Image: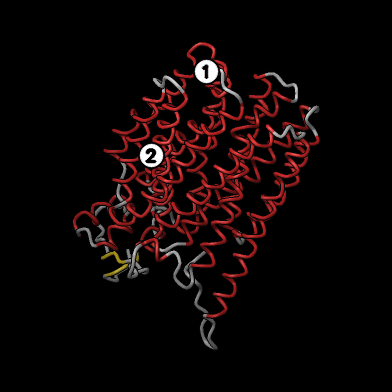
């Protein structure tokens, strides 16, 4: 250990191997976002059963997708700033417990109006859980591997989505849509005790808030595996700025990046949720059976998982904005290919995989990018508000999907239009990279070069 009496928290984490304690946190946060993914995918697959039981039209189903996503957006807006003020762990526990109960109650809905209310409440809890999990994971990751580890954790979302789709497709006939929703509520309830006992508070947040030397030393000692070594006094380099966490997102140095991140999240989640909500329906309308549509749709989630893992590694090696921009452009090509290959199943599966790799994988990378961009005092708010803006894109995507189907547009036209937001996301990331280059250049002096804290 260094002999210096003080050490920055990030330097302390970077100077030690990734410990069992940190791996445990990674797994717990992985499970939280996996449950979110399960819930997101399952509602799309139970929609045909709801439509048949309650004699609904496709247009009347659209609010069901939109209200849950509106709840996600509201939860992110409300609970993110609370995580910066009161800590990541309590907000995460509250969110998980809340959406577990709401999902269980959803299984007993007697009609569409009641289900809409309960889906909003479920979304409210989910909207607070995911940004807290991303922030907490990011703050325990060594900087050279941060993007890789955060994206690995967030693979829980894509795997949970794939699992949710498979469960819904395979068990829907035997347990019904109510059984699927009960599974979505039981899983987080079973996870909650483990989160309560094993999940730590953010070490960076505790040091910044001065939450007690004994508690801080106890957490630090779980990272420092060697016994008998004196722990340094931990400090944080990014001090709390005056004003609310929300106001800090718009201060000089963060404003431009905030707006460009929001644009990326909006476009990305518009695509993801339109496909998650309507891809099985679009494929069914093109003549594919429900089981075949389920198989093809699962390629999207598998591609997203592969994309998240590989893109995270590349983000740690190269310019993260450039890596993600290239991925979005490649995804735009694959989206067009989906519309042109509806009758060719092997090519269709490959194209859907490519869309998942480029869009869903890049969205995971964008979460890691947001967590690295913001300082500790506003990190949870920055991640959650970017997520909330993205959720507004998901609401638009889900609603637009219903409108496009109602307009009876061809699949080719729908997917051609869907490629446009992927191109716009790529442009926003390239602009963010240029903006940060200019910010770094502004700090250049004849003798030193100081890098911006945003990565």
In three-dimensional space, the C-alpha distance between marks 1 and 2, rounded to whole angstroms, equals 27 Å
Above or below, 281 against 84 in this view is: above
**Label 1 Cα crowd, 10 Å radius (few <14 / some 14-19 / many 20+):** few
**How has the structure been colored for display?**
secondary structure
Q: Residue at x 50, y 58 (%)?
A: 144
User: Does the rendering let one see residue 305?
Assistant: no
**In what quadrant of the picture does the N terminus appear?**
bottom left
Q: Residue at x 28, y 53 (%)?
A: 86
Q: Name the spot of residue 263 as percent of width and height, x first.
A: 58, 56
Query: Which quarter of the picture shows residue 231?
Result: bottom left
Q: Name the spot of residue 39 as percent of width and height, x first.
A: 48, 31
Residue at numbered disc 2: 125
Above or below, 324 against 174 in this view is: below
Label drawn at residue 54: 1
Q: Nearer the viewer, residue 328 or 411?
A: 411
Q: Nearer the viewer, residue 430 or 182?
A: 182
Q: Nearer the viewer, residue 128 or 232?
A: 128
Kindly check if marks 1 and 2 are in contact, taking CB atoms under 8 A apart as contact.
no
Q: Nearer the viewer, residue 17 or 332?
A: 332
């Amino acid at each position: 250990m260094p002999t210096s009496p003080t050490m920055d928290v990030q330097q302390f984490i970077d100077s030690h191997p990734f410990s069992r304690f940190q791996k445990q946190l990674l797994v717990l946060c992985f499970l939280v976002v996996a449950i979110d993914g399960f819930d997101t995918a399952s509602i799309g697959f139970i929609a045909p059963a709801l439509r048949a039981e309650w004699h609904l039209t496709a247009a009347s189903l659209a609010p069901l997708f939109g209200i849950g996503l509106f709840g996600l957006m509201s939860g992110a807006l409300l609970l993110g700033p609370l995580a910066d003020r009161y800590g990541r762990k309590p907000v995460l526990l509250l969110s998980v417990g809340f959406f577990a109960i709401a999902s269980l109650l959803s299984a007993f809905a007697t009609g569409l109006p009641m289900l809409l209310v309960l889906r909003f409440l479920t979304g409210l809890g989910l909207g607070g859980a995911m940004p807290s999990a991303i922030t907490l994971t990011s703050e325990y990751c060594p900087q050279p591997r941060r993007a890789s580890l955060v994206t690995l954790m967030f693979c829980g979302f894509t795997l949970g989505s794939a699992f949710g789709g498979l469960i819904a497709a395979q068990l829907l006939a035997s347990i019904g849509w109510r059984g699927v929703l009960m599974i979505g509520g039981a899983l987080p309830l079973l996870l909650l005790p483990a989160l309560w006992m094993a999940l730590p508070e953010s070490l960076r947040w505790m040091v910044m808030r001065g939450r007690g030397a004994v508690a801080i030393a106890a957490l630090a000692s779980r990272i420092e595996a060697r016994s008998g070594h004196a722990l340094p006094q931990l400090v944080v380099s990014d001090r709390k700025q005056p004003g609310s966490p929300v106001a800090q997102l718009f201060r000089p140095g963060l404003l431009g990046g905030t707006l460009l991140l929001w644009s990326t999240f909006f476009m990305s989640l518009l695509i993801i949720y339109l496909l998650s909500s309507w891809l099985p329906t679009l494929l069914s309308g093109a003549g594919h059976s429900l089981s075949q549509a389920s198989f093809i749709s699962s390629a999207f989630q598998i591609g997203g998982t592969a994309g998240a893992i590989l893109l995270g590694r590349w983000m740690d090696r190269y310019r993260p904005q450039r890596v993600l921009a290239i991925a979005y452009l490649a995804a735009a090509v694959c989206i067009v290919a989906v519309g042109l290959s509806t009758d060719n199943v092997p090519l269709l599966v490959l194209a859907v995989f490519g869309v998942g790799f480029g869009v869903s994988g890049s969205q995971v990378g964008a979460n890691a990018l947001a967590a690295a961009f913001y300082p500790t005092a506003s990190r949870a708010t920055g991640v959650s508000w970017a997520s909330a803006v993205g959720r507004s894109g998901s609401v638009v995507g889900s609603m637009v999907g219903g409108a496009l189907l109602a307009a009876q547009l061809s699949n080719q036209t729908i997917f051609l239009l869907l490629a446009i937001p992927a191109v716009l996301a790529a442009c926003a990331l390239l602009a963010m990279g240029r903006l940060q280059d200019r910010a770094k250049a502004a700090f250049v002096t004849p003798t030193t070069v100081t890098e911006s804290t945003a990565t």
